[in-house]
Image (spheres, rainbow, N blue to C red):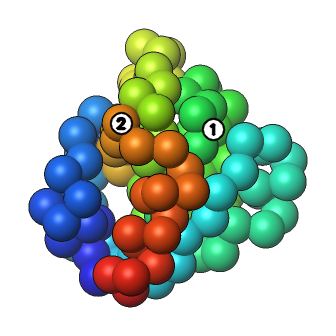
Amino acid sequence: MTVKELIEKLDLKILVEDDLDHEVNDCYIGDLLSWVMGRAPEDSAWLTVMGNINSIAVATLADVSCIILVENAALDEEAKNKAEMHGVNILQSEENSYSLAVKISELI
């Protein structure tokens, strides 16, 4: 499944768009950035409420397919600029992490 397909099937809002053809092969939930950095699988959709600049660095290091900000968590402007610079797809959902992860699991 690609990021684009995930957006379409889950009605996600695009906050920062880069490579929507990036494959999504897994899902990871976490808000403790140091934990996510060492454990999020490559090519995963990372579900979090962390919309700050540090999450962009973690997404880049972990090589996730996208960040999905759950429960309409906000993306700050500095993080948005950094995501655009580093090519990180950032999406947003009204749903909580658990509900969204169940749906992603069914799709992939």
Residue 49 lies in quadrant? top right
Q: Position of residue 40 (x, y in %)?
A: 69, 67
Checking the image for residue 55, the label placed there is 1
Checking the image for residue 75, the label placed there is none
Amino acid under disc 2: Glu
What is the crowding at mark 1: few (fewer than 14 residues within 10 Å), some, or many (at least 20)? many
Q: Quadrant of the C terminus?
A: bottom left
Q: Are marks 2 and 1 in contact (CB under 8 Å)?
A: no
Q: Is residue 23 above or below residue 81?
A: below
Closer to us: 98 or 15: 98
Q: Residue at x 26, y 66 (%)?
A: 6
What is the crowding at mark 2: few (fewer than 14 residues within 10 Å), some, or many (at least 20)? some
Mark before the other along the chain sequence, 2 or 1: 1
User: What residue does disc 2 label?
Assistant: 94
Q: Position of residue 4 (x, y in %)?
A: 19, 65
Q: Is residue 89 left or right of residue 6?
A: right
Amino acid under disc 1: Ser
- Cα distance in 3D space between marks 2 and 1: 19 Å
